[in-house]
Image (tube, rainbow, N blue to C red):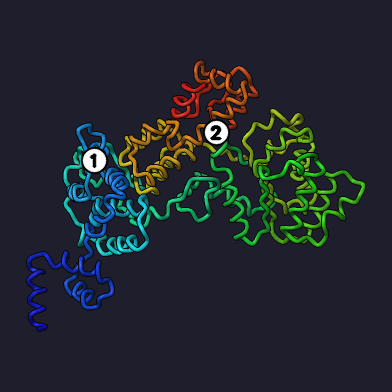
Amino acid sequence: MTEIVDKVVDYFNTSNSLAKLIDKALNENPNNASLKAIKQKFEITTSLVNLLLPLEKQIIKPMQQAYRACCPDQLVDNREYDIPETLNDILHNLDKIPQANANETSIIEFVARLLITAHISKPIAEKIKQWLEENDSAAQSKRLIKNLKSQQNDLLLDEDGTVLLSENELLPPRHSFDSNWLNELEAPEGTVKLRSQFYLQRKNEAKWLDKVLRWGETIRVKGAHQMGKSSLLARMHQRAKQNSQAALYLDFQRLDKTFLSSLDSLLRYIAARMTKHWRTSRSPDSYWSSSLGAKDKLSDFVLEEVLENADLPILLIFDDVDRVFKYDYRDDFFSLIRAWHNERPFEEQWQKLNLVLAYSTEAFLFIQDLNQSPFNVGISIEIGDFSRSKVEEMNRKHNRIARSCGEIDSLINLLGGHPYLLRMAFYTMATKSISVSEFCRVAGDDDGPLAEHLSRYLRQLEAWPDLRHAMQDVLRKHKCQDNEIFYRLRQSGLILGHSPDAVQARCQLYAKYFETRL
């Protein structure tokens, strides 16, 4: 009997039917040891069609989106091109597309994207993941690369600047596709996580981080909204902690209005946070009971409770400190920070205090006496747009979604080097499985991927007529009549320019969006 069974198995194997037969049997009897043994003996891989076919009706749209993302843009943008309507046609077409590299096929990429974008039950998803593990290897997916010249005519550069593609050379349209990569995507909201693989270091960032390890440094970090100031501050804070230094981060945007109602309440709040964070031996109450002014009370508290017994520099970070600019006591508050800076040559204890101030507004518009300002001393760091090389690095971190220099140019032309908008662009293209050309087409739509970001700015401009009129002048005349409004618009990140007489919208996206809505 065993001999007969073996002959039957051999017959189906030689006729290329065994895989389908065993696969179907295992779907009905997943725990059958004999079926598993046959599968292992003949190195049978799970059929992708059998896995996905039952899902075809429910997730055909995500299948089509994932398929489109795997296709060269020139094919997708062809008006005569039709998206396949069945799973079999999708897999058949994908098998014809030139591979991403010697180790993977477009089908591998298609399946990985489908796992992320489609609603697939956990049991089926686990089987699909198993299929990926079994098939994502050089032996299974090796194909010859054919005629990619029609897909890519621009030069592609590797990380070291080496030319990888010229008109007469062939190269896969994408970098090696990691099927785990999409699982690691992070929504580009707020401060970039410390361990995020999507964080891009600024050119001089290593030097900036070293500054917090030194004694007696005042560091000013200036940049418009959503440029990455807080992400840099988080890394400064981490660097100090790694060096066993005491560090405290205070975000002024999170302060309740009650703490900002007066100079005394603000300084007492800062002291209370220090006490809670560093467990000082005496509370602020014992200092506030004296007849001294609030500035002296906080200075004595910091000197005696924080700095006196410190063996290493102390790091104090004030984020969004320009929130204080609108209050009448701003000169008193910032003169206190400047006094701590000035005390260092005369009082050794103050050399233990490192100060970091992050802001976006031009300080000289609000502080009357510049000799009492902390914004013209110490080290100045200005957070600006990403350079082209940084955009290319971001593209590599997102698995080279932009497949050519021309596509990177398209993103930069639309978004400039805006860190947040670029992150949103790559995140959207990855999670929605759309091409660069498609993203650029819909980016400014009212229901597009950047709708929330754009509408928030629009609501703010509509709420402030002076800002709205100034933005209209920028768009039509490239001028801004009011100096203060010029700086407010620049602080918000809406415009670029060094003077009110020569300004422009921050990027093409903003120009097109607001021209039709203001």
Q: Is residue 37 left or right of residue 113?
A: left
The three-letter amino acid code for the residue at tag 1 is Ile
Which element is circle 2 on? helix
Q: Nearer the viewer, residue 22 or 496?
A: 22
| Any part of residue 516 in sight | yes
Question: Residue at coordinates 59% horizontally, 51% vertically from top-left?
Answer: 234
> Residue 442, which numbered label?
none
The three-letter amino acid code for the residue at tag 2 is Arg
Kindly identify which residue carries mark 2: 456
Residue 99 location in percent, x, y?
Answer: 22, 50
Labels 1 and 2: the sequence-earlier one: 1
Marks 1 and 2, Cα distance to the nearest angstrom? 35 Å
| Any part of residue 174 in sight | no
Question: Residue at coordinates 34% horizontally, 54% vertically from top-left?
Answer: 115
Q: Is residue 242 left or right of residue 6?
A: right
Which image quadrant for residue 373?
top right
Question: Residue at coordinates 82% horizontally, 53% vertically from top-left?
Answer: 301
Q: Is residue 262 left or right of residue 215?
A: right
Dot 1, how many residues are within 10 Å of its Cα: few (below 14), some (14-19), or many (20+)?
few
Q: Is residue 12 left or right of residue 323?
A: left
Decide: is 243 above or below 113: below
Callouts 1 and 2 close, C-beta under 8 Å: no
Residue 378 location in percent, x, y?
Answer: 67, 41
Residue 203 location in percent, x, y?
Answer: 49, 44
> Residue 83, which numbered label?
1
Q: Nearer the viewer, residue 441 or 270?
A: 441
